[in-house]
Image: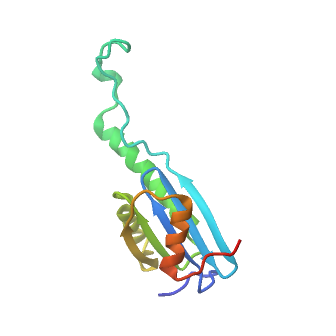
Amino acid sequence: MTTPIGTPANANAGVWIDHRRAQIVGLTATGETTTVILSKADRHPERGGDRPMEGAYEATQVPADDSRQRAFTAALDSYYDAVIAALHNYGRVFVFGPGEAKGELRSRFSKLHLDARIAAVEAADQMTDHQVAAKVRAYFGVAAPRA
């Protein structure tokens, strides 16, 4: 695997990701950085319905399901591209998180011909920021920074 130009050979990153939030922990020889990227994708946009407080449902006033799905997919693509852009200075990337987002991010890496940079993909539950950083450090065998 080749290291991207301008990237130290030992610069690695881990990303915990779901459809709403990505936390990137970057590890370099000079230290550790954390970046959070928030998604603008809304998984379940609500349709108006026959609710007494909102009035009657009218089909012409609600976007079709396929157009809502296209908007959701476009928002996710933009989100994944932002995550990949934040990872451009790192050689190897460890991806983990709950749900489908980690696999979708891996597919996006593959589509951009960057899949060789993915070190591993693992399932993981919700985690605190400190737990995410500790998991990334443990994966790459880096000791915790001293306070």
Q: Residue at x 53, y 70 (%)?
A: 134
When the figure is inspected, residue 134 is found, relative to residue 17, above or below; the finding is below
Q: Residue furthest front?
A: 147
Residue 85 visible in the shown view: no
Please say which color scheme the image uses: rainbow
Where's the C terminus, which quadrant?
bottom right
Quadrant in which residue 119 is drawn: bottom left
Q: Residue at x 51, y 64 (%)?
A: 131
From this view, report whether residue 115 is shown above or below residue 23. Answer: below
**Where is residue 39 drawn, in percent x and y?**
49, 49
Q: Quadrant of residue 30?
A: bottom right
- In the picture, measured across the screen, residue 132 lies left or right of residue 147, that is left
Work out whether residue 27 or residue 7 is closer to the camera in this orientation and state it.
27
x%, y% of residue 135?
49, 71
38 left or right of 63? right
Measured as percent of width and height from the top left, residue 65 is found at 29, 37
Viewer-proximal residue among 57 and 35: 35
Q: Is residue 55 left or right of residue 30?
A: left
Instruction: Judge whether 118 appears above or below 106 on screen.
Output: below
Q: Residue at x 49, y 53 (%)?
A: 21
Q: Is residue 1 visible?
A: yes
Count how many numbered circles sit on residues in the image.
0
Q: Position of residue 116 (x, y in %)?
A: 43, 80
